[in-house]
Image: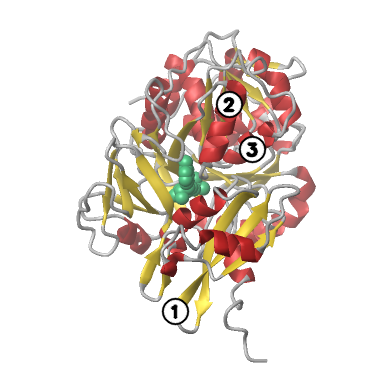
């Protein structure tokens, strides 16, 4: 048996002297460098006592060596566990205690703080890697031999555990197998036509599925190159476009680039593909981008637990406000959230998916795993949506964001779409707050366009004729911006906490 994921990457990647990673200042890290460095890193892992099946947790800044360590884990049969760099020592402590890794790699500047959390979780080894590529792990990698006999791993062996962002309750560790990652990346490579001529602007974080698996694995399997940026910066992305062919981003990348005076047809003429995902792309952003650049952004839908599920077509129409069709090999259905029974076309319900992309369950949480898979193997995504007559999938929001007011269901996306269409509105988020009479009352949190004369009264009255009475927001709150996480998702849980008492002022 070979090493399922790394064997496929090695077999289909580019020639050794081709850059895998380029930096804007002329740095090159070739495929040959990648094979040698990942061999050294796999030897370093083994020397540190990491055995096949062990977890390797890493809370490190974005540096090519972090990707080397990810591949080294695959080669050594270990399970890579990337952690968001924003997590506090207490949060890291929870993940280390839950995953029980044999090795934890962190930033040298945080070693002291985090070593305590690691000791409490009985992690045997703590090594370091900094944003500059320096640290004890980097030293160990540099000193180890290049040649490594890859550990045999089958399709169902675990390659990674990715913790979900966990806006309600504790984060859950999605167990991703070698084939979950490989099958999805091969599908995306072919669906989006990636080849060894592609150069991808990589400005996403690498602790999340989008930047780590979608962007990195797809380009590795195509033998293409990455222009690696430590983080998103509109000026740097504009500078990279003349030598790049493609970018994968979250919606905020696109809204920020639209604010850049340099964005034009000329500036994007070398690019062939702009992909968006991880959060809803406003139809307005899609149209504005097309108007300025001539490119139709390709929106796709996925999640930590499932990799990518749907995509707008490469050749056919990329419909703004939809996430396209189920990918080849992925079955997607929309069902009644309570009974799991079938629904008619165009009816809103729970999105469920099944396919080689869907994770093996949640790490050490058999009850949660059982609760989120149907008996026939479909995974309950928690996203509400519908499939339209043409087969395009629409997402209307997370199930937990559904508002039930006076016994009626209100889907926030429908209200947000109406509000966003009002003159002077930049964007909005609709949430429910506890209400004595109705159970929940609808609230709109609205961001105005600069200089727009818009107030609560004008928003509420403009919606009067557009929405059924039960859907009408009872309050509209004007704010400067919406709270978002690093992947561009609006954090509705924060808004709900903030406005929890808006209808029922607590007794003093
Ligand atoms: P994560 O596990 O952090 O990748 O988050 C996955 C969630 O992001 C999904 O369950 C959706 O709620 C949301 N999401 C991802 N892509 C899209 C998209 N294109 N449109 C709307 N929501 C999306």
- The CA distance from mark 3 to mark 1 is 36 Å
Q: Residues within 10 Å of mark 1 (few under 14, many from 20)?
A: some
Say which quarter of the image contains residue 471.
Answer: bottom left
Mark 1 or 2: in front is 2
Query: With 266 as the anchor, is 301 left or right in this view?
Result: left
- The CA distance from mark 3 to mark 2 is 13 Å
Nearer to us in this view, 325 or 65: 325
Residue 259, percent from left and from top: 71, 34
Q: Earlier in the sequence, mark 1 or mark 2?
A: 2
The residue singled out by tag 2 in the image is 291
The residue singled out by tag 1 in the image is 438
- The CA distance from mark 1 to mark 2 is 43 Å
Nearer to us in this view, 235 or 102: 235
Query: With 274 as the anchor, is 257 left or right in this view?
Result: right
Q: Which mark is residue 255?
A: 3
Nearer to us in this view, 36 or 261: 261
Task: Residue 21: tell me if it is visible.
Answer: yes
Residue 245, percent from left and from top: 57, 16
Q: Earlier in the sequence, mark 3 or mark 2?
A: 3
Q: Residues within 10 Å of mark 2 (few under 14, many from 20)?
A: few
Q: Which mark is residue 70?
A: none
């Amino acid at each position: 048996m070979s090493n399922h994921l790394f064997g496929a990457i090695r077999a289909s990647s580019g020639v050794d002297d081709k850059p895998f990673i380029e930096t804007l200042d002329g740095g090159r890290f070739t495929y040959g460098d990648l094979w040698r460095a990942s061999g050294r890193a796999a030897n370093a892992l083994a020397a540190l006592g990491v055995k096949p099946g062990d977890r390797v947790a890493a809370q490190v800044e974005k540096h090519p060596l972090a990707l080397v360590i990810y591949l080294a884990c695959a080669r050594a049969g270990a399970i890579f566990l990337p952690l968001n760099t924003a997590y506090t020592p207490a949060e890291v402590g929870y993940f280390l205690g839950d995953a029980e890794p044999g090795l934890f790699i962190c930033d040298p500047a945080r070693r002291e703080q985090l070593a305590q959390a690691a000791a409490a979780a009985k992690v045997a080894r703590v090594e370091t890697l900094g944003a500059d590529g320096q640290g004890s792990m980097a030293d160990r990698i540099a000193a180890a031999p290049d040649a490594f006999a890859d550990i045999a791993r089958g399709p169902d062996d675990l390659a990674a555990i990715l913790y979900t962002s966990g806006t309600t309750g504790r984060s859950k560790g999605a167990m991703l197998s070698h084939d979950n990652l490989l099958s999805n990346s091969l599908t995306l490579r072919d669906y989006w036509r990636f080849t060894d001529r592609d150069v991808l602007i990589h400005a996403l974080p690498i602790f999340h599925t989008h930047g780590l698996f979608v962007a990195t694995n797809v380009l590795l399997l195509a033998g293409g190159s990455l222009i690696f940026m430590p983080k998103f910066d509109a000026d740097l992305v504009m500078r990279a476009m003349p030598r790049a062919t493609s970018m994968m981003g979250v919606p905020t990348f696109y809204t920020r680039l639209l604010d850049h005076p340099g964005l034009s047809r000329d500036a994007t003429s070398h690019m062939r593909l702009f992909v968006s995902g991880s959060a809803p792309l406003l139809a307005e952003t899609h149209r504005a981008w097309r108007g300025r650049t001539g490119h139709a952004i390709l929106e796709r839908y996925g999640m930590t637990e499932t990799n990518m599920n749907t995509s707008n077509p490469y050749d056919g129409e990329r419909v703004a406000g939809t996430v396209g069709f189920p990918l080849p090999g992925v079955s997607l259905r929309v069902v009644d959230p309570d009974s799991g029974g079938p629904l008619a076309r165009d009816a809103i319900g729970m999105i469920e998916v099944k396919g080689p992309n869907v994770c093996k369950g949640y790490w050490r949480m058999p009850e949660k795993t059982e609760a989120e898979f149907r008996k026939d193997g479909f995974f309950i995504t928690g996203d509400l949506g519908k499939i339209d007559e043409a087969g395009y999938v629409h997402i209307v929001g997370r199930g937990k964001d559904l508002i039930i007011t006076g016994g009626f269901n209100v889907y926030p996306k429908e209200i947000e779409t109406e509000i966003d269409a009002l003159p002077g509105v930049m964007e909005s988020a609709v949430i429910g707050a506890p209400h004595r009479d109705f159970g929940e009352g609808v609230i709109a949190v609205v961001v105005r366009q600069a200089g727009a004369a818009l107030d609560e009264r004008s928003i509420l009255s403009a919606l009067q004729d557009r929405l059924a009475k039960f859907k009408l927001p009872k309050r509209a709150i004007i704010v400067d911006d919406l709270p978002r996480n690093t992947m561009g998702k609006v954090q509705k849980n924060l808004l709900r906490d903030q406005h929890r008492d808006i209808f029922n002022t607590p007794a003093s």
